Image (cartoon, rainbow, N blue to C red):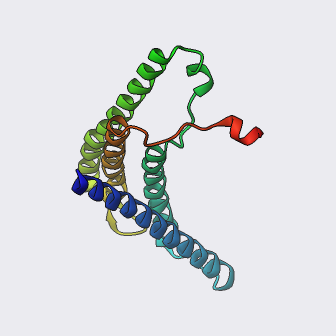
Amino acid sequence: MKALKKAKQLMDQLLLVISITLISIMVLVILYQIFTRTFLSFTPAWSEELARVLFVWISLFGIAYGFKEKLHISVGLLVKKFNEKTQNLIEFLTKLLIISFGVVLIYFGTEFMLLMNYSSLAGLGISSSYLYAAIPVAGIFITINGIELLFVKGLHQEFDEDALEG
């Protein structure tokens, strides 16, 4: 169990490091594009497309991280109106939906990535598969995080509104 926990922590750290790296690269590419357009009167063809590819990867990794940290919007006010047994059932079904969503992303994202292998990104001169590979990769992270949410009790403490008022 310790090895599994350590592997999960390593995966979480990897997701965070990759996301920060991609954001940094995207910012540098956009700054370079602004500099060349403003001061050198030309825009590199690859810069806009690379920024777009990085944005897709960052967005999908953000979704995966959001599921891990339970940062996505939920309707907690409505759920709290039910009894505890119903609340637990809704929580369980929500976690199953997260896992199902991740599996769908893996399956159909892989199919779409393979389909796009014969298409290329004109500005970068690479296969479109590199863009669409973000879908199954994010699906893997979402599925693993969903499984962790399902089986690890007390992973996230509920938001305590009373703590803010006092």
Q: Nearer the viewer, residue 59 or 29?
A: 59
Residue at the outermost right position: 166
Residue furthest to the front:
166
**Which quadrant of the figure has residue 19?**
bottom left
- Where in the figure is residue 81, as x and y percent of width and height? 60, 16
Query: Which residue occupies the foreground of this view, 120 or 70?
Result: 70
Q: Residue at x 68, y 85 (%)?
A: 39
Q: Position of residue 109 (x, y in %)?
A: 30, 44
Q: Kindly identify the residue that appears in the image at 30 percent across and 48 percent down.
A: 140
Classify 99 as above or below 120: above
For residue 31, side relative to residue 57 (left or right): right
| Residue 83 relative to residue 95: left or right | right
Percent of width and height locating residue 12: 38, 57
Q: Is residue 34 above or below residue 79?
A: below
Disc tally is 0
Q: Return the residue nearer the eye: 144 or 133.
A: 144
x%, y% of residue 108?
28, 39
Name the residue located 39 percent from the left edge and 32 percent from the top edge.
95
Determine whether, in the image, residue 33 is placed left or right of residue 144: right
- Which quadrant would residue 14 be assigned to in this image? bottom left
Outermost residue on the bottom side: it is 40
> Where on the picture, by quarter, is residue 124?
bottom left
State the residue at coordinates (63%, 37%). 160
Quarter containing the C terminus:
top right
